[in-house]
Amino acid sequence: MLYFPNAKINIGLHITSKREDGFHNLSTLFYPTKLSDGLEIVRSERDESHLSLSGLKIDGSAKDNLVYKAYEMIHAKYNIPVVDLHLHKKIPFGAGLGGGSSDASFVLKGLNKMFDLHISNEMLMDMAAELGSDCPFFIINEPCFATGRGDVLTPSLLSLKGYRLVLVHPNIMVSTPDAFRYVVPQVPDIPLEESLSMPITRWKDHVVNHFEKSVFCQYPKIKELKDKLYQLGATYASMSGSGSTVFALFEEYVPWSKEMLSPSYFVWDEVL
Ligand SMILES: C[C@@](CO)(OP(=O)(O)O)[C@H](O)COP(=O)(O)OP(=O)(O)OC[C@H]1O[C@@H](n2ccc(N)nc2=O)[C@H](O)[C@@H]1O
Ligand SMILES: Nc1ncnc2c1ncn2[C@@H]1O[C@H](COP(=O)(O)OP(=O)(O)O)[C@@H](O)[C@H]1O
């Protein structure tokens, strides 16, 4: 079977406190995008399941990959037959787009379906949460408001249908644990849900990503990129997650090209 694990963006991201388990409480809105990896899972005649990789080169061995970890989790609990997994990596990583988390959750969902394991969505989400804080969202994969460490999800009615979404990855890798290390938790005056209920034209002044302050300080090029997207006419622009991708929402078609940013940047453009 062929699957297309997609990326997410974070629309607003508040880091509100540090928890005793070392994680942080946050609030954010996860929104799925169409930028996807390719994932194939087929039954195999080999003695042992195997993961092969193509596309962007991910650090670490195949066995360190979240795809393999998700396979191992299902295998340990359900003793499924041997499979061959292939991941074609297209979503930039260390990018705030949750690509690895999406891959992992699609493996859980894929194996559940392939082998009729009848695992409930709630159970899949619990298993996903063990693989990563962002993973449960990709089980639902519809706009969701998230709290806790990102694993407490409430589906959201927010629709950006018709907006043009542009994602720009400036070839900078931001490590998620490092980004959390440098952020100072704070409870903002206006809760994120309230600022998100404002018209999108007002988000620019009200919907914030708390990671921007420390990440922009370390990588001024990311801030320049956000400013540039506003100059090009974005209604709203923000860094996604812990960075480094910056996304922008445009109401109308703007005749701009990749060259107006920097030719080496990765650009993804879709109509939501
Ligand atoms: C920041 C966010 C926002 O959506 O996304 P990305 O920028 O990575 O895409 C997520 O919270 C990333 O979730 P995820 O990438 O799954 O993180 P995990 O593997 O669970 O955790 C990696 C490390 O980040 C820190 N971490 C993560 C989540 C959280 N709520 N608090 C934390 O402090 C911890 O140090 C943890 O060891
Ligand atoms: N399938 C995968 N895709 C991407 N990264 C993976 C994968 N499996 C493990 N990783 C590890 O996770 C790190 C970043 O994962 P990812 O979820 O893409 O982060 P982010 O959401 O911050 O972009 C990579 O640097 C890599 O070490």
Image (cartoon, rainbow, N blue to C red):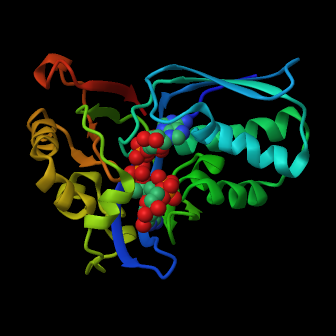
Kindly identify the residue that appears in the image at 46 percent across and 31 percent down. Answer: 58
Along the line of sight, the residue nearer the viewer: 113 or 33: 113
In this picture, residue 40 sits left or right of residue 97? right
Vertical placement of 154 versus 134: above or below?
A: below
Residue 98 in view, yes or no: no
Q: Which of 164 and 267 is in front in this view?
A: 267
Task: Say if residue 80 shows up in the picture.
Answer: yes
Position of residue 147 relative to residue 84, above or below, is below
The residue located at (23%, 45%) in the rendering is: 237
- Identify the image quadrant of residue 207: bottom left
Residue 91 image offset from top left, x and y in percent: 44, 30
| Residue 98 coordinates in the image, percent (x, y) | 47, 44
Q: Is residue 100 left or right of residue 241?
A: right
Q: In which quarter of the image is the N terminus?
A: top right
- For the image shown, how many numbered marks are present on the structure? 0
* Residue 136, quarter of the rendered image: bottom right
**Quadrant into which the C terminus falls:** top left
**Does residue 6 sit above or below 195 in this rendering?**
above
Can you give x and y, in whole percent of width and height, for residue 187 in the image?
A: 30, 80
The structure residue drawn at horizontal position 23% and vertical position 33%, both measured from the top left corner, is 170
